Amino acid sequence: MSLIALATYRRAGGLATALVLDNQLYDLEAAQAAGLPAARAEWIGGGVEAMLKDWDQAGTWLRSVAPQAAALAAQGSIQPVAEGESAVAAPYVPQRIFCAASNYASHANEMGTVLAAKSVSKPYMFLKLSNTVIGNGEPILMPPETSKLDWEVELAAVIGKRCRRISAEDALDAVACYTIVNDISARDLNVRSDYPFKHDWFQGKCHDTFAPIGPWLVPAWQIPDPQAVNLRLDVNGEPMQQDSTANMIWTVREQIAYLSTIVTLEPGDVVATGTPTGVGMGRGVYLNAGDRLVASIEGIGRLSNRVQAERV
């Protein structure tokens, strides 16, 4: 078995929790009925979000049952969800998504951003809200106010332990899982001339559907070094971004430690850790209705969404 993850999927009657085994979805309740050691009732009822809030126990359970789940799948004792990846929804809806700006030198350069030396600087973070969250296969709505819709593939760390002023050395202990975030931006709405404040990232980045997330959550033990994974984003099958998290300015550890000096991080918080070069603004190319984006990260999977004009 090369992958186990947690997913939420669409089925008749609503959403349900699934185990992901080598990119195949298996209903968690069905796996339990087939002999998988029982998950807590509150995890079944509350789904992935409830598991994150109890990650010390849920993570331990998931790791312990992984071999047995794989054996049940191999024996045919449990069957994959018929619709497979097409049924995947957002794993859950985080209330807070902390995003890192200009965290790859190559991206800063393509945007014309002049950065201070790291020795005299600190991470630059901003927030996206729960309204921005969509899952795999759901449409990114293009507001009529923008003509410069853009993409940003990012590795996202999902917090599994409440922490305040955690050290960089200990920061990865607070990470439950990793996933993908596509930080969608309306570049022409990110700037303003009617105020002395030149940037408006709320207006440019917080529209509904502007944070595709997923396709599922991969437990942190399966990505032992988050600074050694490859990222990629394709638009209509054409590669736009290809890089490694090794090229981050501020590491995942450093970002979590910094955030925790400002706010107490809670289970379920997401830290989107920045994007590399290759965004549309740097190329002078922007998204249009009908365009298909596929954000992929090594060891996690593929997050696919199409752009759709928002109806007004």
Image (cartoon, rainbow, N blue to C red):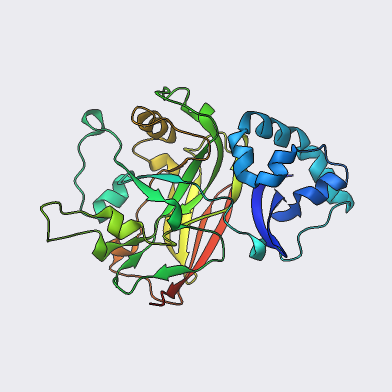
The answer to whether residue 21 of the structure is visible from this angle is no
Relative to 53, residue 280 above or below: below
- Quarter of the image where one finds residue 10: bottom right
Give coordinates of residue 285: x percent, y percent: 32, 70
The N terminus, quarter of image: top right
Give coordinates of residue 237: x percent, y percent: 50, 70
Relative to 128, residue 137 above or below: below
**What residue is drawn where x is 59% and y is 38%?**
52
The C terminus, quarter of image: bottom left
**What residue is drawn where x is 43% and y is 35%?**
252
Relative to 237, residue 301 above or below: above
**What residue is drawn where x is 20% and y is 54%?**
199
Using the image as rendered, state which of residue 17 and residue 232 is in the foreground: 17
Give coordinates of residue 223: x percent, y percent: 57, 38
Report the side of 129 relative to 203 (left or right): right
Using the image as rendered, state which of residue 236 and residue 68 is in the foreground: 68
**What residue is drawn where x is 31% and y is 46%?**
101
Q: Number of numbered discs present?
A: 0
- Quarter of the image where one finds residue 177: top right
Report the side of 214 relative to 198 (left or right): right
The answer to whether residue 177 of the structure is visible from this angle is yes
